[in-house]
Amino acid sequence: MEIEKSVIYVSMFLALFISSLTMVSLREVKAMPDITYIDFPNHTIPLGIEYSSNLSLAYVAMMYNLLHSAIAEVDTINMTYEIFVIPVYDLHISELAIDGDKNIWVGPMANATVKFYRENRTFKIIELPYYSGPITLYFKDFIWTIHGYYLMKINYTTNTVEDSYYIPGFKYIGDMIGYKDCIYMSSINMV
């Protein structure tokens, strides 16, 4: 029985280890047969990605040295990148959003969200009335973030919360997208 448990634990560890190795490279897939690879440093784990077609830039949310999070700006024409470490510990971003001014937003930080000003390469921490989760969306000229029971609507030009919506019954939001006049959310009911 103990040997079986050890085998299961080792198998789980190997599966996690192998899956973490596969997340180390951003892959851009073009029409076949051209495939372009970008290899980020080994101490980074890319998680979420957004693409700005009018700037020909991709932005990648990533873990950096396991203690920090960072945003990588990828020039998709020259296939070069620059990494910007977010100056806050214990911030684990997985998704990001690009607002109407082409600035980058990430949201999984206690009662705040982080805005990266692309032009001057600086970060601003914006306090929120409720805990902000890792899901951040730019939709209908607003930044939207959610965690727990609250969806917050943030004006990206003034960096202020314009409204918040109580959403009963949601325990964990898996993801959200905007389409037409609605925001659709997936939820995991954690009992």
Image (tube, rainbow, N blue to C red):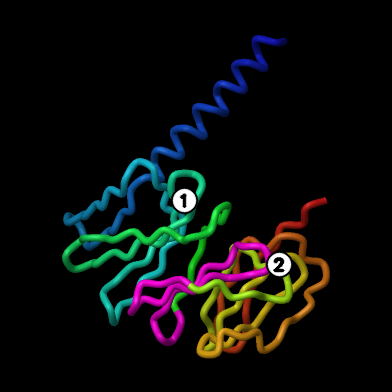
Check residue 88 for magenta coloring. Answer: no
Residue bounds of the magenta highlight: 99-123
- The residue positioned 51% from the left and 34% from the top of the image is 16
Could you say which disc has been placed on residue 80 in the image?
A: none
Quarter-wise, where is residue 183 in the image?
Answer: bottom right
Crowd class of label 1 (few under 14; some 14 to 19; many from 20; radius 10 Å): many
Distance from label 2 to label 1 (Cα)? 20 Å
Of callouts 2 and 1, the N-terminal one: 1
Quarter-wise, where is residue 50 in the image?
Answer: bottom left
Check residue 111 for magenta coloring. Answer: yes
Residue 39 shown left or right of residue 131 in the figure: left
- Front residue of this view, candidates 29 and 67: 67
Residue 55 shown left or right of residue 175 in the figure: left
Quarter-wise, where is residue 130 in the image?
Answer: bottom right
- The residue positioned 64% from the left and 83% from the top of the image is 153
- Residue 178, given in percent of the width and then of the height, sits at 56, 79
- The residue positioned 18% from the left and 68% from the top of the image is 77
- Residue 139, given in percent of the width and then of the height, sits at 53, 83
Q: Secondary structure at mark 1?
A: strand
Callout 2 touching callout 1 (CB < 8 Å)? no
- In the image, what residue type sits under mark 2? Tyr
> Where is mark 1, residue-wise?
63
> Where is mark 2, residue-wise?
131
Quadrant location of the N terminus in the rendered image? top right
